[in-house]
Image: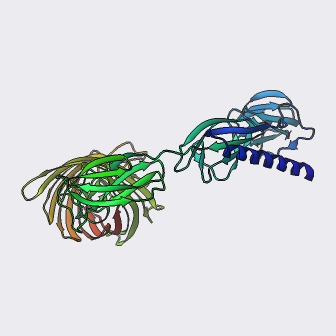
Amino acid sequence: MLLQRFTAFLAIFIISAGALFSDENASSSGIFVEDKSVQKGFEFDEAYSTYPELLESDRKSAIEKEKTKITVKSNVPNAEVFLNGNFEGHTNLTVNDLPAGRYNLRVKKTGYKPKFYRINVPQGEERVFYVELEKYEGTVNFIAVQPETLIYVDNTKISGNIIQLEEGSHTVFAKKFGYKSESSSIYVPRNSYQIITIRLQEAQFSVSNFRANKERFNPALKGSAGQIKFNFEVTSFGNGTLTIKDSLGNSVISRNLPGFTTWTQNVIWDGIAQNGTKIQDGTYTAILESGEQKFSVDFSADSSIKIPSASITASGSGIGILPAAFNFPEKTFCVGANAGIICAFENKNFYCAPLSTFFAYSFSKNVELSAKVGLNAGHEGSSPFINSALKFTASKKQADFDMDFGFLIRAGGAKNKPFEPYGADNGCGLGGGLVFGLDFNNFYAGISSEFTFATSTFNTKNDNYDKVLRNGICFQLKGQSVSFAIYSALNSSFGTTALENDSRSSNSIEFLRAVDVGFDFQIALNSLNLNLRSNAQIFENQTYLKTEAGISMLL
Protein backbone atom coordinates (compact mmCIF):
# COMPACT_ATOMS: atom_id res chain seq x y z
CA MET A 1 0.00 0.00 0.00
CA LEU A 2 2.82 2.41 0.90
CA LEU A 3 4.63 1.57 -2.34
CA GLN A 4 1.46 2.22 -4.36
CA ARG A 5 0.93 5.66 -2.77
CA PHE A 6 4.58 6.61 -3.38
CA THR A 7 4.33 5.50 -7.03
CA ALA A 8 1.13 7.53 -7.54
CA PHE A 9 2.67 10.61 -5.94
CA LEU A 10 5.80 10.28 -8.08
CA ALA A 11 3.72 9.98 -11.25
CA ILE A 12 1.72 13.12 -10.44
CA PHE A 13 4.91 15.03 -9.61
CA ILE A 14 6.57 14.06 -12.89
CA ILE A 15 3.48 14.96 -14.94
CA SER A 16 3.13 18.35 -13.19
CA ALA A 17 6.81 19.19 -13.54
CA GLY A 18 6.83 18.16 -17.18
CA ALA A 19 3.75 20.27 -17.93
CA LEU A 20 5.26 23.30 -16.18
CA PHE A 21 8.57 22.90 -18.05
CA SER A 22 6.80 22.63 -21.39
CA ASP A 23 4.66 25.70 -20.60
CA GLU A 24 7.66 27.88 -19.84
CA ASN A 25 9.11 27.09 -23.25
CA ALA A 26 5.92 27.43 -25.26
CA SER A 27 4.99 30.61 -27.09
CA SER A 28 1.19 30.27 -27.25
CA SER A 29 -1.07 31.47 -24.43
CA GLY A 30 -4.34 30.12 -23.09
CA ILE A 31 -5.85 27.51 -20.76
CA PHE A 32 -4.79 23.96 -21.69
CA VAL A 33 -5.67 20.47 -20.47
CA GLU A 34 -2.18 18.94 -20.25
CA ASP A 35 -3.09 15.60 -18.65
CA LYS A 36 -6.33 13.81 -17.90
CA SER A 37 -6.82 10.43 -16.28
CA VAL A 38 -10.11 8.85 -15.30
CA GLN A 39 -10.38 6.06 -12.77
CA LYS A 40 -13.61 4.09 -12.93
CA GLY A 41 -15.17 4.22 -9.49
CA PHE A 42 -17.27 1.45 -7.93
CA GLU A 43 -20.96 2.32 -8.30
CA PHE A 44 -23.87 0.72 -6.48
CA ASP A 45 -26.09 1.05 -9.55
CA GLU A 46 -23.82 -1.46 -11.26
CA ALA A 47 -23.28 -3.88 -8.40
CA TYR A 48 -24.54 -4.32 -4.86
CA SER A 49 -22.28 -4.43 -1.87
CA THR A 50 -22.10 -7.83 -0.27
CA TYR A 51 -22.62 -6.33 3.20
CA PRO A 52 -24.51 -3.02 2.84
CA GLU A 53 -24.59 -0.71 5.84
CA LEU A 54 -27.64 -0.75 8.10
CA LEU A 55 -29.41 2.61 7.85
CA GLU A 56 -31.01 3.71 11.11
CA SER A 57 -34.29 5.59 10.83
CA ASP A 58 -34.26 9.32 11.35
CA ARG A 59 -37.27 8.97 13.63
CA LYS A 60 -39.98 6.42 14.40
CA SER A 61 -43.49 6.46 15.81
CA ALA A 62 -46.22 3.94 16.59
CA ILE A 63 -49.10 3.28 14.19
CA GLU A 64 -51.76 0.58 13.94
CA LYS A 65 -50.43 -2.72 15.24
CA GLU A 66 -50.62 -4.65 11.95
CA LYS A 67 -49.51 -1.78 9.71
CA THR A 68 -46.12 -0.61 8.41
CA LYS A 69 -45.10 2.73 6.97
CA ILE A 70 -41.76 4.08 5.78
CA THR A 71 -40.76 7.46 4.37
CA VAL A 72 -37.53 7.94 2.41
CA LYS A 73 -36.18 11.49 2.27
CA SER A 74 -33.07 12.90 0.64
CA ASN A 75 -31.15 16.16 0.32
CA VAL A 76 -31.77 15.87 -3.43
CA PRO A 77 -35.36 16.13 -4.75
CA ASN A 78 -36.76 13.50 -7.12
CA ALA A 79 -34.08 10.89 -6.43
CA GLU A 80 -35.09 7.35 -7.46
CA VAL A 81 -35.92 4.89 -4.66
CA PHE A 82 -35.56 1.10 -5.03
CA LEU A 83 -36.53 -1.57 -2.49
CA ASN A 84 -35.02 -5.00 -3.12
CA GLY A 85 -34.27 -3.86 -6.68
CA ASN A 86 -37.83 -2.74 -7.43
CA PHE A 87 -38.46 0.94 -8.32
CA GLU A 88 -40.91 2.47 -5.83
CA GLY A 89 -40.90 6.21 -6.70
CA HIS A 90 -39.02 9.44 -6.07
CA THR A 91 -38.00 11.22 -2.91
CA ASN A 92 -39.64 12.27 -0.74
CA LEU A 93 -41.42 8.91 -0.88
CA THR A 94 -43.86 7.23 1.51
CA VAL A 95 -44.63 3.50 1.21
CA ASN A 96 -47.45 1.93 3.25
CA ASP A 97 -48.18 -1.65 4.26
CA LEU A 98 -44.91 -3.33 3.37
CA PRO A 99 -44.52 -6.81 4.77
CA ALA A 100 -42.45 -6.51 7.93
CA GLY A 101 -38.82 -7.49 7.53
CA ARG A 102 -35.44 -6.37 6.23
CA TYR A 103 -35.04 -4.64 2.85
CA ASN A 104 -32.26 -3.45 0.57
CA LEU A 105 -32.73 0.28 -0.03
CA ARG A 106 -31.07 1.97 -3.01
CA VAL A 107 -31.33 5.73 -3.73
CA LYS A 108 -29.85 7.19 -6.92
CA LYS A 109 -29.96 10.21 -9.22
CA THR A 110 -27.98 11.12 -12.31
CA GLY A 111 -24.82 13.02 -11.40
CA TYR A 112 -24.78 11.74 -7.81
CA LYS A 113 -23.14 8.79 -6.13
CA PRO A 114 -25.86 6.20 -5.44
CA LYS A 115 -26.33 4.94 -1.88
CA PHE A 116 -27.17 1.35 -0.87
CA TYR A 117 -28.37 0.35 2.64
CA ARG A 118 -30.18 -2.30 4.62
CA ILE A 119 -33.29 -1.11 6.50
CA ASN A 120 -35.61 -2.74 9.03
CA VAL A 121 -39.38 -2.43 8.59
CA PRO A 122 -41.15 -3.56 11.80
CA GLN A 123 -44.90 -3.97 12.22
CA GLY A 124 -46.83 -1.28 14.06
CA GLU A 125 -44.25 1.45 13.39
CA GLU A 126 -43.71 4.38 11.06
CA ARG A 127 -40.05 4.97 10.22
CA VAL A 128 -38.39 7.86 8.36
CA PHE A 129 -35.06 7.30 6.59
CA TYR A 130 -32.86 10.15 5.39
CA VAL A 131 -30.31 9.51 2.63
CA GLU A 132 -27.56 12.04 1.88
CA LEU A 133 -26.43 11.92 -1.75
CA GLU A 134 -23.09 13.35 -2.87
CA LYS A 135 -22.31 14.70 -6.31
CA TYR A 136 -19.69 13.01 -8.44
CA GLU A 137 -16.45 14.96 -8.42
CA GLY A 138 -13.12 15.13 -10.17
CA THR A 139 -9.77 16.55 -9.12
CA VAL A 140 -8.27 19.47 -11.04
CA ASN A 141 -4.70 20.69 -10.64
CA PHE A 142 -4.23 24.25 -11.94
CA ILE A 143 -0.66 25.16 -12.92
CA ALA A 144 -0.09 28.84 -13.72
CA VAL A 145 3.07 29.66 -15.64
CA GLN A 146 3.02 33.24 -14.30
CA PRO A 147 3.19 33.28 -10.48
CA GLU A 148 0.36 34.96 -8.56
CA THR A 149 -2.13 34.51 -11.40
CA LEU A 150 -5.69 34.93 -10.14
CA ILE A 151 -7.85 31.93 -11.10
CA TYR A 152 -11.65 31.87 -10.99
CA VAL A 153 -13.85 28.83 -11.51
CA ASP A 154 -17.49 29.59 -12.22
CA ASN A 155 -16.91 33.20 -11.06
CA THR A 156 -15.46 32.09 -7.70
CA LYS A 157 -11.81 32.77 -6.89
CA ILE A 158 -9.97 29.61 -5.90
CA SER A 159 -7.34 29.33 -3.19
CA GLY A 160 -4.69 26.70 -3.75
CA ASN A 161 -3.94 24.89 -6.98
CA ILE A 162 -5.65 21.52 -6.45
CA ILE A 163 -9.43 21.57 -6.00
CA GLN A 164 -12.39 19.22 -6.27
CA LEU A 165 -15.05 20.12 -8.85
CA GLU A 166 -18.43 18.58 -9.49
CA GLU A 167 -18.83 16.48 -12.61
CA GLY A 168 -19.74 18.62 -15.60
CA SER A 169 -18.69 21.76 -17.47
CA HIS A 170 -17.04 24.66 -15.68
CA THR A 171 -15.80 28.08 -16.78
CA VAL A 172 -12.20 28.95 -15.91
CA PHE A 173 -11.07 32.58 -15.95
CA ALA A 174 -7.50 33.70 -15.24
CA LYS A 175 -5.96 37.13 -14.97
CA LYS A 176 -2.83 38.91 -13.79
CA PHE A 177 -1.97 42.56 -13.99
CA GLY A 178 0.24 43.20 -16.99
CA TYR A 179 -1.12 40.20 -18.91
CA LYS A 180 -4.12 39.49 -21.12
CA SER A 181 -6.92 37.65 -19.35
CA GLU A 182 -7.92 34.18 -20.56
CA SER A 183 -11.21 32.32 -20.29
CA SER A 184 -12.11 28.76 -21.25
CA SER A 185 -14.61 26.00 -20.56
CA ILE A 186 -13.43 22.65 -19.15
CA TYR A 187 -15.26 19.40 -18.56
CA VAL A 188 -14.62 17.44 -15.36
CA PRO A 189 -15.52 13.71 -15.54
CA ARG A 190 -16.32 11.80 -12.37
CA ASN A 191 -13.43 10.25 -10.46
CA SER A 192 -10.92 12.02 -12.72
CA TYR A 193 -7.63 13.81 -12.22
CA GLN A 194 -6.51 16.43 -14.72
CA ILE A 195 -3.85 19.11 -15.00
CA ILE A 196 -4.89 22.49 -16.38
CA THR A 197 -2.01 24.72 -17.46
CA ILE A 198 -2.62 28.46 -17.65
CA ARG A 199 -0.26 30.55 -19.71
CA LEU A 200 -0.98 34.30 -20.10
CA GLN A 201 0.39 36.60 -22.74
CA GLU A 202 1.88 39.96 -21.80
CA ALA A 203 -0.51 42.85 -22.44
CA GLN A 204 0.37 45.99 -24.30
CA PHE A 205 -0.03 49.09 -22.11
CA SER A 206 -3.25 51.05 -22.70
CA VAL A 207 -5.61 53.35 -20.83
CA SER A 208 -9.42 53.34 -21.04
CA ASN A 209 -12.64 54.67 -19.49
CA PHE A 210 -11.32 57.94 -18.03
CA ARG A 211 -14.18 59.57 -16.08
CA ALA A 212 -15.11 61.75 -13.09
CA ASN A 213 -17.44 60.54 -10.35
CA LYS A 214 -19.30 63.89 -10.32
CA GLU A 215 -20.30 66.49 -12.84
CA ARG A 216 -19.92 69.26 -10.25
CA PHE A 217 -18.62 69.72 -6.71
CA ASN A 218 -18.00 72.44 -4.12
CA PRO A 219 -14.36 72.54 -2.90
CA ALA A 220 -15.47 74.57 0.13
CA LEU A 221 -17.34 71.58 1.59
CA LYS A 222 -15.77 69.21 4.08
CA GLY A 223 -14.88 65.57 3.47
CA SER A 224 -15.86 63.64 0.34
CA ALA A 225 -18.54 66.19 -0.62
CA GLY A 226 -15.74 68.71 -1.28
CA GLN A 227 -13.73 66.34 -3.47
CA ILE A 228 -13.90 64.98 -7.01
CA LYS A 229 -12.54 61.57 -8.02
CA PHE A 230 -11.13 60.63 -11.41
CA ASN A 231 -11.13 56.97 -12.39
CA PHE A 232 -9.59 55.04 -15.28
CA GLU A 233 -8.37 51.55 -16.18
CA VAL A 234 -4.94 50.42 -17.36
CA THR A 235 -3.78 47.09 -18.75
CA SER A 236 -0.14 47.02 -17.64
CA PHE A 237 2.63 48.78 -15.76
CA GLY A 238 3.11 52.42 -16.68
CA ASN A 239 2.67 56.01 -15.55
CA GLY A 240 0.90 59.19 -16.56
CA THR A 241 0.13 62.84 -15.83
CA LEU A 242 -3.15 64.39 -14.70
CA THR A 243 -3.60 68.11 -15.46
CA ILE A 244 -6.53 70.35 -14.50
CA LYS A 245 -7.17 73.36 -16.76
CA ASP A 246 -9.67 76.19 -16.45
CA SER A 247 -12.06 77.36 -19.17
CA LEU A 248 -9.31 79.57 -20.69
CA GLY A 249 -6.91 76.65 -21.02
CA ASN A 250 -4.66 77.75 -18.14
CA SER A 251 -3.12 74.98 -16.04
CA VAL A 252 -4.53 74.93 -12.49
CA ILE A 253 -2.58 71.94 -11.18
CA SER A 254 -0.59 69.06 -12.61
CA ARG A 255 0.14 65.77 -10.87
CA ASN A 256 2.44 62.91 -11.91
CA LEU A 257 0.92 59.44 -11.63
CA PRO A 258 3.80 56.96 -11.39
CA GLY A 259 3.83 53.20 -11.02
CA PHE A 260 0.47 51.70 -12.04
CA THR A 261 0.32 48.31 -10.32
CA THR A 262 -3.33 47.35 -10.72
CA TRP A 263 -6.11 47.65 -13.28
CA THR A 264 -8.22 50.41 -11.71
CA GLN A 265 -6.73 53.81 -10.85
CA ASN A 266 -8.32 56.51 -8.66
CA VAL A 267 -7.12 60.09 -8.28
CA ILE A 268 -8.87 62.32 -5.71
CA TRP A 269 -8.65 66.13 -5.92
CA ASP A 270 -9.93 68.58 -3.30
CA GLY A 271 -10.04 71.63 -5.56
CA ILE A 272 -6.79 73.14 -4.27
CA ALA A 273 -4.77 74.74 -7.07
CA GLN A 274 -0.99 74.54 -7.50
CA ASN A 275 -0.63 77.86 -5.59
CA GLY A 276 -2.52 76.53 -2.55
CA THR A 277 -5.81 78.37 -3.10
CA LYS A 278 -9.26 76.89 -3.72
CA ILE A 279 -10.53 77.15 -7.28
CA GLN A 280 -13.33 79.55 -8.18
CA ASP A 281 -16.72 78.60 -9.62
CA GLY A 282 -16.57 77.65 -13.28
CA THR A 283 -15.99 74.89 -15.81
CA TYR A 284 -12.75 72.89 -15.72
CA THR A 285 -11.17 70.14 -17.78
CA ALA A 286 -9.20 67.18 -16.42
CA ILE A 287 -6.64 65.88 -18.93
CA LEU A 288 -4.97 62.46 -18.54
CA GLU A 289 -1.84 61.82 -20.60
CA SER A 290 -0.06 58.47 -20.63
CA GLY A 291 2.40 57.57 -23.37
CA GLU A 292 0.80 58.56 -26.63
CA GLN A 293 -2.72 58.39 -25.22
CA LYS A 294 -4.68 61.46 -24.12
CA PHE A 295 -8.12 61.70 -22.48
CA SER A 296 -10.20 64.54 -21.06
CA VAL A 297 -13.38 65.07 -19.04
CA ASP A 298 -15.19 68.31 -18.09
CA PHE A 299 -16.59 69.17 -14.66
CA SER A 300 -17.70 72.23 -12.71
CA ALA A 301 -16.87 73.90 -9.42
CA ASP A 302 -20.13 75.15 -7.86
CA SER A 303 -20.21 76.95 -4.51
CA SER A 304 -24.03 76.73 -4.40
CA ILE A 305 -23.83 73.01 -3.52
CA LYS A 306 -24.55 72.56 0.18
CA ILE A 307 -24.43 69.78 2.74
CA PRO A 308 -27.74 69.94 4.61
CA SER A 309 -27.86 69.47 8.38
CA ALA A 310 -30.15 66.50 7.96
CA SER A 311 -31.54 63.55 9.85
CA ILE A 312 -32.63 60.35 8.05
CA THR A 313 -36.36 60.00 8.65
CA ALA A 314 -38.78 57.29 7.55
CA SER A 315 -39.37 59.49 4.49
CA GLY A 316 -35.75 60.30 3.59
CA SER A 317 -33.44 63.13 4.61
CA GLY A 318 -35.15 65.78 6.69
CA ILE A 319 -35.35 67.59 10.00
CA GLY A 320 -36.32 65.66 13.14
CA ILE A 321 -39.04 63.25 11.99
CA LEU A 322 -40.18 65.34 9.00
CA PRO A 323 -38.89 65.02 5.42
CA ALA A 324 -37.42 68.13 3.78
CA ALA A 325 -37.12 69.37 0.18
CA PHE A 326 -33.34 68.99 0.02
CA ASN A 327 -30.95 66.14 -0.80
CA PHE A 328 -27.32 65.41 -0.09
CA PRO A 329 -24.84 66.40 -2.84
CA GLU A 330 -24.92 64.10 -5.87
CA LYS A 331 -23.07 60.76 -5.69
CA THR A 332 -22.86 61.05 -1.89
CA PHE A 333 -23.54 58.32 0.67
CA CYS A 334 -24.71 59.13 4.19
CA VAL A 335 -24.50 56.24 6.67
CA GLY A 336 -25.00 56.20 10.42
CA ALA A 337 -26.73 54.84 13.51
CA ASN A 338 -29.09 56.10 16.20
CA ALA A 339 -29.95 54.99 19.73
CA GLY A 340 -32.62 56.37 22.01
CA ILE A 341 -35.23 55.86 24.68
CA ILE A 342 -39.01 56.35 24.69
CA CYS A 343 -41.10 56.90 27.82
CA ALA A 344 -44.90 56.65 28.01
CA PHE A 345 -46.34 59.40 30.19
CA GLU A 346 -49.71 57.74 30.92
CA ASN A 347 -48.05 55.13 33.14
CA LYS A 348 -44.88 57.21 33.61
CA ASN A 349 -42.34 54.50 32.82
CA PHE A 350 -39.99 53.12 30.17
CA TYR A 351 -41.71 52.11 26.91
CA CYS A 352 -38.93 50.98 24.56
CA ALA A 353 -35.40 51.79 23.30
CA PRO A 354 -35.22 52.31 19.52
CA LEU A 355 -31.91 51.26 17.89
CA SER A 356 -31.35 51.77 14.16
CA THR A 357 -28.85 51.96 11.33
CA PHE A 358 -29.52 53.88 8.13
CA PHE A 359 -28.16 55.03 4.80
CA ALA A 360 -29.07 57.57 2.12
CA TYR A 361 -27.61 57.90 -1.36
CA SER A 362 -28.11 60.74 -3.84
CA PHE A 363 -28.03 59.35 -7.36
CA SER A 364 -28.05 62.94 -8.60
CA LYS A 365 -28.88 66.36 -7.19
CA ASN A 366 -32.57 65.48 -7.72
CA VAL A 367 -32.96 61.82 -6.64
CA GLU A 368 -32.32 60.28 -3.23
CA LEU A 369 -32.81 56.73 -1.94
CA SER A 370 -32.83 56.01 1.80
CA ALA A 371 -33.47 53.09 4.14
CA LYS A 372 -33.49 52.50 7.89
CA VAL A 373 -33.58 49.21 9.80
CA GLY A 374 -33.67 48.67 13.55
CA LEU A 375 -35.64 47.41 16.49
CA ASN A 376 -37.66 48.81 19.35
CA ALA A 377 -35.77 47.08 22.13
CA GLY A 378 -37.94 46.14 25.06
CA HIS A 379 -41.22 46.43 23.17
CA GLU A 380 -42.95 43.04 22.84
CA GLY A 381 -39.78 41.04 22.35
CA SER A 382 -37.75 43.85 20.76
CA SER A 383 -39.89 44.43 17.69
CA PRO A 384 -37.87 44.92 14.46
CA PHE A 385 -38.82 47.61 11.94
CA ILE A 386 -37.78 48.81 8.48
CA ASN A 387 -38.35 52.00 6.46
CA SER A 388 -37.43 52.93 2.91
CA ALA A 389 -38.10 56.01 0.77
CA LEU A 390 -37.41 57.44 -2.67
CA LYS A 391 -37.41 61.24 -2.86
CA PHE A 392 -37.37 63.53 -5.92
CA THR A 393 -36.51 67.21 -5.48
CA ALA A 394 -35.81 70.32 -7.54
CA SER A 395 -34.57 73.80 -6.68
CA LYS A 396 -35.11 77.26 -8.16
CA LYS A 397 -32.53 79.87 -7.23
CA GLN A 398 -33.83 83.28 -6.17
CA ALA A 399 -31.90 86.45 -5.35
CA ASP A 400 -31.38 85.68 -1.63
CA PHE A 401 -32.57 82.11 -1.21
CA ASP A 402 -33.28 78.79 -2.93
CA MET A 403 -36.86 77.62 -3.35
CA ASP A 404 -36.90 73.81 -2.94
CA PHE A 405 -39.78 71.46 -3.69
CA GLY A 406 -40.32 67.77 -4.34
CA PHE A 407 -42.30 64.62 -3.71
CA LEU A 408 -41.59 61.19 -2.16
CA ILE A 409 -42.87 57.64 -1.95
CA ARG A 410 -42.24 55.46 1.11
CA ALA A 411 -42.91 52.11 2.75
CA GLY A 412 -42.34 50.77 6.24
CA GLY A 413 -43.40 48.19 8.73
CA ALA A 414 -42.83 46.82 12.22
CA LYS A 415 -43.38 43.32 13.56
CA ASN A 416 -45.39 44.53 16.56
CA LYS A 417 -47.27 47.82 16.25
CA PRO A 418 -46.16 50.34 18.86
CA PHE A 419 -47.68 53.56 20.17
CA GLU A 420 -51.22 52.82 21.24
CA PRO A 421 -53.88 54.19 20.86
CA TYR A 422 -52.71 54.29 17.21
CA GLY A 423 -53.68 56.68 14.42
CA ALA A 424 -50.43 58.69 14.16
CA ASP A 425 -47.58 58.42 11.63
CA ASN A 426 -44.70 56.43 13.15
CA GLY A 427 -42.98 55.23 9.98
CA CYS A 428 -45.23 52.28 9.11
CA GLY A 429 -47.48 51.82 6.12
CA LEU A 430 -47.40 52.69 2.42
CA GLY A 431 -47.61 56.27 1.26
CA GLY A 432 -46.21 59.38 -0.28
CA GLY A 433 -45.93 63.08 0.25
CA LEU A 434 -45.05 66.57 -0.92
CA VAL A 435 -42.28 68.77 0.47
CA PHE A 436 -41.47 72.47 0.08
CA GLY A 437 -38.78 74.67 1.58
CA LEU A 438 -37.07 78.08 1.50
CA ASP A 439 -33.32 77.72 1.95
CA PHE A 440 -31.45 80.86 3.03
CA ASN A 441 -27.74 80.97 3.82
CA ASN A 442 -28.24 80.54 7.57
CA PHE A 443 -31.92 79.61 7.80
CA TYR A 444 -34.27 76.97 6.42
CA ALA A 445 -38.07 76.86 6.61
CA GLY A 446 -40.02 73.89 5.29
CA ILE A 447 -43.43 72.28 5.17
CA SER A 448 -44.44 68.70 4.37
CA SER A 449 -47.63 66.77 3.81
CA GLU A 450 -47.68 62.96 3.88
CA PHE A 451 -50.48 60.45 3.49
CA THR A 452 -50.00 56.81 4.56
CA PHE A 453 -52.20 53.77 4.08
CA ALA A 454 -52.26 50.89 6.60
CA THR A 455 -50.32 53.05 9.04
CA SER A 456 -51.08 50.89 12.07
CA THR A 457 -52.04 47.57 10.51
CA PHE A 458 -49.48 46.97 7.77
CA ASN A 459 -48.37 43.30 7.66
CA THR A 460 -51.00 42.15 10.14
CA LYS A 461 -54.10 39.98 9.78
CA ASN A 462 -56.48 42.90 10.32
CA ASP A 463 -58.90 43.62 7.49
CA ASN A 464 -59.73 47.25 8.32
CA TYR A 465 -56.82 49.43 7.24
CA ASP A 466 -56.48 52.89 8.74
CA LYS A 467 -55.05 55.98 7.01
CA VAL A 468 -53.14 58.96 8.41
CA LEU A 469 -52.47 62.43 7.00
CA ARG A 470 -49.50 64.21 8.64
CA ASN A 471 -48.89 67.90 7.92
CA GLY A 472 -45.69 69.33 9.36
CA ILE A 473 -43.62 72.51 9.54
CA CYS A 474 -39.97 73.01 10.52
CA PHE A 475 -37.49 75.84 11.05
CA GLN A 476 -33.70 75.46 11.18
CA LEU A 477 -30.90 77.88 12.10
CA LYS A 478 -27.63 76.91 10.37
CA GLY A 479 -24.11 77.83 11.41
CA GLN A 480 -20.82 76.74 9.89
CA SER A 481 -20.61 73.62 12.11
CA VAL A 482 -23.76 73.76 14.28
CA SER A 483 -27.45 73.75 13.51
CA PHE A 484 -30.62 73.85 15.62
CA ALA A 485 -34.16 73.14 14.44
CA ILE A 486 -37.68 72.96 15.83
CA TYR A 487 -40.63 71.25 14.19
CA SER A 488 -44.27 70.34 14.70
CA ALA A 489 -46.79 68.13 12.90
CA LEU A 490 -50.52 67.44 13.05
CA ASN A 491 -51.70 63.83 12.57
CA SER A 492 -55.21 63.33 11.15
CA SER A 493 -56.73 59.83 11.31
CA PHE A 494 -59.16 58.23 8.86
CA GLY A 495 -60.63 54.79 9.60
CA THR A 496 -59.73 52.32 12.31
CA THR A 497 -58.19 48.89 12.86
CA ALA A 498 -59.11 45.62 14.52
CA LEU A 499 -56.08 45.93 16.77
CA GLU A 500 -56.59 45.48 20.49
CA ASN A 501 -56.72 48.77 22.43
CA ASP A 502 -57.44 50.85 19.31
CA SER A 503 -59.57 53.60 20.84
CA ARG A 504 -61.01 54.84 17.56
CA SER A 505 -64.56 54.05 16.52
CA SER A 506 -65.29 52.24 13.26
CA ASN A 507 -64.71 54.39 10.13
CA SER A 508 -63.88 57.37 12.31
CA ILE A 509 -62.41 60.68 11.10
CA GLU A 510 -60.29 62.60 13.60
CA PHE A 511 -58.54 65.68 12.23
CA LEU A 512 -56.73 66.25 15.55
CA ARG A 513 -55.69 62.70 16.36
CA ALA A 514 -52.17 63.46 17.63
CA VAL A 515 -49.56 66.24 17.60
CA ASP A 516 -45.77 65.91 17.20
CA VAL A 517 -43.40 68.58 18.52
CA GLY A 518 -39.62 68.40 18.86
CA PHE A 519 -36.15 69.81 18.29
CA ASP A 520 -33.06 68.67 16.37
CA PHE A 521 -29.49 69.72 17.27
CA GLN A 522 -26.49 68.81 15.06
CA ILE A 523 -22.71 69.32 15.13
CA ALA A 524 -20.65 68.82 11.95
CA LEU A 525 -17.03 67.61 12.27
CA ASN A 526 -15.56 67.27 8.77
CA SER A 527 -17.44 64.28 7.28
CA LEU A 528 -18.86 63.26 10.67
CA ASN A 529 -22.14 64.58 12.00
CA LEU A 530 -23.28 64.26 15.64
CA ASN A 531 -26.94 64.76 16.39
CA LEU A 532 -29.30 64.95 19.35
CA ARG A 533 -33.04 65.15 18.92
CA SER A 534 -36.13 64.90 21.08
CA ASN A 535 -39.80 64.86 20.24
CA ALA A 536 -43.14 64.29 21.93
CA GLN A 537 -46.14 62.59 20.33
CA ILE A 538 -49.24 63.72 22.14
CA PHE A 539 -52.56 61.85 22.00
CA GLU A 540 -55.63 62.86 24.00
CA ASN A 541 -54.94 60.32 26.78
CA GLN A 542 -51.32 59.35 26.10
CA THR A 543 -48.00 61.07 25.44
CA TYR A 544 -44.74 59.53 24.26
CA LEU A 545 -41.43 61.34 24.80
CA LYS A 546 -38.52 60.20 22.61
CA THR A 547 -34.90 61.26 23.04
CA GLU A 548 -32.35 60.02 20.51
CA ALA A 549 -28.64 60.51 19.76
CA GLY A 550 -26.73 59.40 16.70
CA ILE A 551 -23.77 59.72 14.41
CA SER A 552 -23.59 59.85 10.63
CA MET A 553 -20.84 60.07 8.02
CA LEU A 554 -20.68 61.25 4.43
CA LEU A 555 -18.83 58.97 2.02
Residue with the most extreme left position: 399
Dividing the picture into quadrants, the one containing residue 30 is top right
The residue closer to the viewer here, 26 or 432, is 26
Q: Residue visible at 31% across and 49% down?
A: 363
Left or right of 334? Residue 35 is right
Q: Is residue 388 visible?
A: no
Q: Residue visible at 83% across and 44% down?
A: 55
The residue closer to the viewer here, 533 or 160, is 160
Residue 208 placement (x, y as % from top left): 39, 45
The residue closer to the viewer here, 544 or 495, is 544
Dividing the picture into quadrants, the one containing residue 65 is top right
Q: Quadrant of the C terminus?
A: bottom left
Left or right of 485? Residue 144 is right
Left or right of 83? Residue 355 is left
Q: Is residue 341 visible?
A: yes
Residue 254 placement (x, y as % from top left): 29, 60
Residue 406 placement (x, y as % from top left): 20, 48
What is the total number of numbered labels drawn onto the structure image? 0
Left or right of 33? Residue 549 is left
Residue 415 placement (x, y as % from top left): 44, 53
The residue closer to the viewer here, 150 or 191, is 150
Q: Residue visible at 65% across and 48% down?
A: 145
